[in-house]
Image (tube, helix red, strand yellow):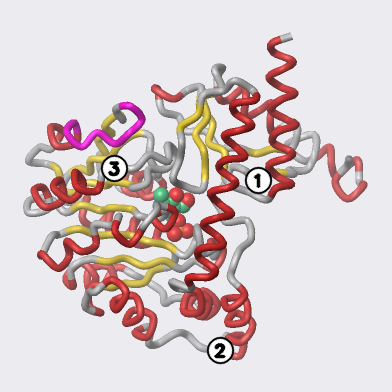
């Protein structure tokens, strides 16, 4: 097939065929809930106006989390909070983070001259003991991602609680919970309650993943009031009307959430099956993605998949040079992936 039937245009594209499966992103392919869609449409008349008061959503989130409204901050995606606070807190020293992990904000900090000490995973999980041992008098911030992206592995919540209680008295800790709604009994798998015990932790969450609003850029964080003030002092712009309206409409909408969680869980099972059929090891995941050991250089596999219109993500970590991350997607996208990877593997093993 050619792109819109135009051979010349097709030849100009970076791959032979149009991308059919966007498995490089970690999404809920169904996007916003019905309520969120209606709210987006209804907010169009507000488009000429900036949002001057975002307290309604902050109050709603605070009530769910049993926190004070001053402990809740909104940002344009959770990445804005992650980047702004990493660069601002990190400039007093260095940042410690696991590797591999989500690192867009860490690169942002590095570009501002901040050193990030990356600590390898152990058994594919964040190694809290090694992170503790890596702390020096220079350490200004620790970043943890739970569930971790790209491995999809999860920290034991009681170990994470102990770590945060002990370490946050000396060093602030960001805990990125972008995928936490996918954990069973997720409301019990967050460190947010530690904010009632004065812990200097910053918990980031997002409407981008399970809620399907990535393109509308809205996320939130839970932290001590002085950290929320710090975040707002660094922020240059307000939320956008559509993202704000959609978030209001879908936050903890239990019907939608359960449907999304069920779908994403079943997607992961389909990806596991594709791995098993092709004899590829993978990590059981609690995120919107599966990390797969392709048993060959990941870049080669990525290129081979891309030539068939399937885009996947790789992370340049020395311990995971054979691994690709495959995101949850529509059944059709997963079907393309299955056909493409099976073809590649059977050609290699022939
Ligand atoms: N944190 C993690 C672990 C992610 O995987 C992502 C996006 O992929 C983000 C944060 C940023 O997402 P957003 O800025 O859309 O909330």
Left or right, residue 21 beside residue 136: right
- Badge 2 marks a residue whose secondary structure is helix
Our reading of the magenta stretch's main secondary structure is loop
Q: Nearer the viewer, residue 16 or 165?
A: 165
Q: Which image quadrant is residue 95 in?
A: top left
- Badge 3 marks a residue whose secondary structure is loop
Q: Which residues are magenta?
A: 123-130
Q: On residue 150, which mark appears? A: none
The N terminus lies in quadrant = top right
Q: Earlier in the sequence, mark 2 or mark 3?
A: 2
- Residue 343 percent location from the top left of the image: 75, 23
Tag 2 residue: 46
Tag 3 residue: 155
Residue contact at pointers 1 and 3, CB within 8 angstroms = no
Q: On residue 22, which mark appears? A: 1
Between circles 1 and 2, the one closer to the viewer is 1
Residue located 39% across and 69% down the image: 75
Q: Nearer the viewer, residue 168 or 235?
A: 168
Q: Earlier in the sequence, mark 1 or mark 3?
A: 1
Q: Nearer the viewer, residue 54 or 93?
A: 54
- Residue 250 percent location from the top left of the image: 50, 74
């Amino acid at each position: 097939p050619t792109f819109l039937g135009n051979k010349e245009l097709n030849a100009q594209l970076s791959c032979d065929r149009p991308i059919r499966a966007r498995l490089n992103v970690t999404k809920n392919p169904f996007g916003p809930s019905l309520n969120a869609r209606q709210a987006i449409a209804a907010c169009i008349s507000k488009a000429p106006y900036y949002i001057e008061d975002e307290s309604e959503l902050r109050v709603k989130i605070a009530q769910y989390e049993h926190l004070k409204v001053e402990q809740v901050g909104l940002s344009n995606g959770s990445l804005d909070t992650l980047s702004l606070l990493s660069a601002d807190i990190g400039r007093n020293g260095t940042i410690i983070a696991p590797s591999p992990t989500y690192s867009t904000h860490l690169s942002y900090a590095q570009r501002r001259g901040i050193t990030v000490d990356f600590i390898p995973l152990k058994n594919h999980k964040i190694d809290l003991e090694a992170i503790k041992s890596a702390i020096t008098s220079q350490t200004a911030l620790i970043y943890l991602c739970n569930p971790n992206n790209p491995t999809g592995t999860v920290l034991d919540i009681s170990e994470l609680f102990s770590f945060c209680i002990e370490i946050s008295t000396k060093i602030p800790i960001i805990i990125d919970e972008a995928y936490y709604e996918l954990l069973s009994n997720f409301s019990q798998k967050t460190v947010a309650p530690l904010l009632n015990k004065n812990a200097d932790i910053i918990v980031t969450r997002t409407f981008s993943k399970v809620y399907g609003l990535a393109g509308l850029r809205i996320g939130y964080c839970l932290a001590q009031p002085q950290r929320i003030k710090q975040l707002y002092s660094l922020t240059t712009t307000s939320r956008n009307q559509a993202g704000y309206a959609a978030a209001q409409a879908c936050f903890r909408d239990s019907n939608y959430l359960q449907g999304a969680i069920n779908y994403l869980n079943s997607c992961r099972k389909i990806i596991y099956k594709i791995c098993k059929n092709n004899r590829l090891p993978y990590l059981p995941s609690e995120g919107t993605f599966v990390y797969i050991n392709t048993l060959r250089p990941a870049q080669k596999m990525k290129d081979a998949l891309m030539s068939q219109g399937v885009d996947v993500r790789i992370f340049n970590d020395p311990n995971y040079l054979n691994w690709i991350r495959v995101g949850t997607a529509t059944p059709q996208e997963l079907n393309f992936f299955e056909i493409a990877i099976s073809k590649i593997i059977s050609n290699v093993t022939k």
